[in-house]
Amino acid sequence: MARIPSTQALRALESFARHGTVWQAADELNLTRSAVSHQLRLLERDLGFRMFDRVGTRIELTPQGMAYAGDIRRALSSIAGSAARNAGRGVTGTLTVSCTPGFAATWLCPKIGRFREVSPDVALSIVTPRRLDDVSNPDVDLFLTFGTGNLPDMQVELLKEVEFTPLCSPVLLNRIGGLAEPRDVKRAGLLHLHERADWRRWFRLAGVDEAAARGGVVFADMNLVYAASMNAQGIAMGDEFICHGAMEAGALVRPFDLAIRSPRSYFLVVPPEKAGNPAVDAFRSWIMAELPPSRA
């Protein structure tokens, strides 16, 4: 059997393949750039085939390197999935999870049966908070929040950074004859959540007068925004992570390859007094294995 490369080198390769830069891989793995570069060089040497092309000061994966990185990603996902599937075996007790309504309705609920499969003896309850970053409910064991993560008295772990981009129904897109330029989204009818800040930021990035964000319909809940957009009632400033299922099904499409990074992200938050709950550990292991890798 051929010698298996070090796990650290394989993780460095997988992260580099997703992000495309050494510095982003280093940031994700909490390593220095030189450490990641060293791991990649050693890996290429040990494998015995050319994995990288040097383009100036940058490196890029060769076709062989990309194929190998894909195999490694699947292998690491399998390992993580196995850990999650077995971590909950035999765990009992109760677990109350507080989750933002959009995350719960579009991502968590369609997958929650998988957690029940690996932890069938955990009595699970899902509740939704009044605010997306609310962690005040004393009955909750684990919070899935959307905010800045600045909660010094809690155990906080980043789940997913978020980018927003216009999303709409293909029915609407066909009805209005397509969207050739960013300024054309005004013809589709804007859909807003609470305020117009996200649309203003996107128009500014696209080089369009922010005044274009005026008008449209304002909703109090993101689920209502997505329901309206999927029913061809307008175009929403959407979160691709939450809308992944709708995009896979063709209910929503992304007309422009232009996105704004949200100042807020999804976090997993555990009160310190609940950290000893085995069901909390089982749920955390499961959700980390379920989360898709970050888009490069």
Image (tube, rainbow, N blue to C red):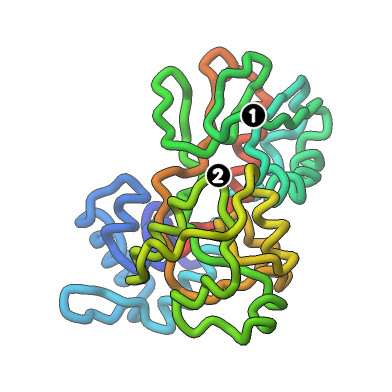
Query: In this figure, which residue is indicated by the disc labeled 2?
Result: 194
Contact between marks 2 and 1 (CB within 8 A): the answer is: no
Which residue appears farthest toward the left when viewing the image? 56
Q: Residue placed at 41% from the left, 77% from the top?
A: 65
> Element under label 1?
loop
Q: Earlier in the sequence, mark 2 or mark 1?
A: 1
Question: Given the image, on which type of amino acid does mark 2 rest?
Answer: His
Q: Is residue 136 above or below residue 2?
A: above
Q: Pointer 1: what residue? A: 129
- Confirm whether residue 124 shows in the render: yes
Q: In the image, 109: left or right of 2?
A: right
Measure the C-alpha gap from mark 2 to mark 1: 17 Å
Q: Is residue 139 or residue 93 the one in the foreground?
A: 139
Q: Quadrant of residue 97?
A: top right
Query: Label 2's element?
Result: loop
Badge 1 amino acid: Pro
